[in-house]
Amino acid sequence: MNRHFEDARYYLTRAGKKAKQGVAEELEPVEEKFKALTGDDEEPELGRLDNIREELEEIEERAEGEAKEAVTKARERIRSYREGEDATPSESKA
């Protein structure tokens, strides 16, 4: 891309960010007044969807833990089987 276009894109992006900050700063008193009039200062209660998300996260964590335990047990069984298998052929040949 031409250097002039890169510079222009940079300055347009920067100008957009500054404009967004300026609008937010100008609207801050209006937002505070609106919240004071409507009583919207408090956080809303968790909705049904939020509760379901929390439950799913808990289930996911529990399932992950159970899967790790199962993998660990399987590895131990394989290791013990292989150790037992190594000893068995030498005994069966005799």
Image (cartoon, rainbow, N blue to C red):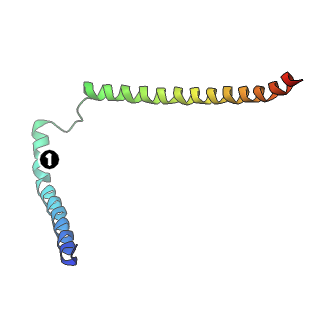
Residue 75 pos. (x, y %)? 64, 30
Q: Is residue 9 above or below residue 49?
A: below
Element type at mark 1: helix
- Front residue of this view, candidates 82 and 62: 82
- Front residue of this view, candidates 90 and 73: 90
| Mark 1: few/some/many CA within 10 Å (<14, 14-19, 20+) | few
Residue 28 pos. (x, y %)? 14, 52
Residue 73 pos. (x, y %)? 63, 26
Left-right relation of 93 to 80: right
- Badge 1 is on which residue? 32
Residue in view at x 76 percent, y 26 percent: 85
Residue type, numbered disc 1:
Glu
Residue 56 pos. (x, y %)? 37, 27
Q: Is residue 53 above or below residue 12?
A: above
* Quadrant into which the C terminus falls: top right
Residue in view at x 21 percent, y 76 percent: 2
Residue 15 found in image quarter: bottom left
